[in-house]
Amino acid sequence: MKKPQWVVDKERGKRAAAAETVWLFGLHAVRDALENPARQRLRLIVTKNAADKLADAIAASGMEPELADPRKFPAPIDPGSVHQGAALEVKALDWGPLAEVCLGDPDTRDDQPPLVVLLDRVSDPHNVGAILRSAEVFGARAVIGMRHHAAPETGALAKTASGALERQPYLRVTNLSDAMRELKNMGFTLVGLAGEAEADLATTLAPLKGRAIALVLGAEGPGLREKTRETCDHLAKIPFTSDFGSLNVSNAAAVSLYAARHG
């Protein structure tokens, strides 16, 4: 019996995802990936200088590095990338199901109420990397982006995240609205950040203290899409003291995470 086309497409997508690899670069990002037992590592290219600096991490990983001439660094990364003589080919991390990650293991999770960040078409890897770093600092359970029209794991993202990519769950979902509804069913209150909202963030968060919160942020410029707005429980703004200028999405995420955790 012939398989339906949607089944064929789904299986093809799974095979393509399984075959995908990521090149991480830079001493910090490579060291953290070498020290992460959850990382599936494939190929390590280093200069002699980088190998000396990463000696302990390389030894602990059990990998056999390929020594490279710094003038002819062979890793297939952007020539403008600041690789510092180290590049590591890896498989993307698999953090597991959304519910399991966002609610956490009851035997190991802390006493703080769950906090997650959802990104609506935020595609700049530098922004997502900075958001992952802030999410780790403020104890978010996960950063959730979209499988399409969003930043995948890349070397640039990992470098900006400054190690957080190895420790902070970054989930990518096919349908953001479905993920938002799933979070609602799990008890999360969804707060969307929108500059034109009437209520400010602190006022919106005040009655939600002690509850599970999902902060929803959109791409710079277009912001949240209409469907995303409709799925949020509240829309709130970060008030500004000047009549011009605004925060970029990574800074807005950091402010929002601080407000949600310590407001």
Image (cartoon, helix red, strand yellow):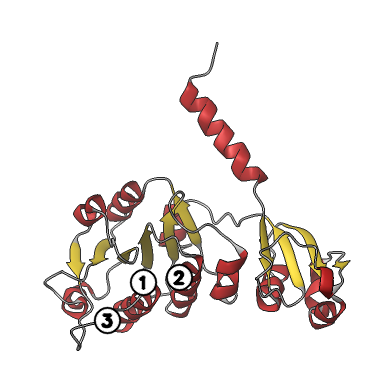
Q: Position of residue 189 (x, y in %)?
A: 25, 62
Which structural element holds mark 1? helix
Quadrant in which residue 208 is drawn: bottom left
Near mark 1 (Cα within 10 A), the count class, few <14, some 14-19 or many ≥20, is many
Tell me the residue at 79%/78% (across/down).
54
Q: Position of residue 103 (x, y in %)?
A: 41, 61
Which structural element holds mark 3? loop
> Please, is residue 13 above or below residue 115 in the view?
above
Precedes in sequence: disc 1 or disc 2: 2
> Please, is residue 104 above or below residue 19 in the view?
below
| Disc 3 residue type (three-letter) | Gly
* Quarter of the image where the N terminus is located: top right
Near mark 3 (Cα within 10 A), the count class, few <14, some 14-19 or many ≥20, is few
* Quarter of the image where the C terminus is located: bottom left
Precedes in sequence: disc 3 or disc 2: 2
Tell me the residue at 81%/72% (across/down).
58
Tell me the residue at 83%/73% (across/down).
71
Nearer to me, 196 or 94: 196
Q: Which residue is mark 1?
A: 249
The circle drawn on residue 127 is: 2
Q: Is residue 182 left or right of residue 26?
A: left
Task: Mark 3 vs mark 2: give the one in front.
Answer: 3
Q: Which residue is mark 3?
A: 245
| Disc 1 residue type (three-letter) | Val
Task: Mark 1 vs mark 3: give the one in front.
Answer: 3
| Disc 2 residue type (three-letter) | Asn
Spatial CA distance of label 1 from label 2 is: 7 Å
Q: Is residue 88 left or right of residue 17?
A: right
Q: Is residue 177 left or right of residue 145?
A: left
Q: Are marks 1 and 2 in contact (CB under 8 Å)?
A: yes
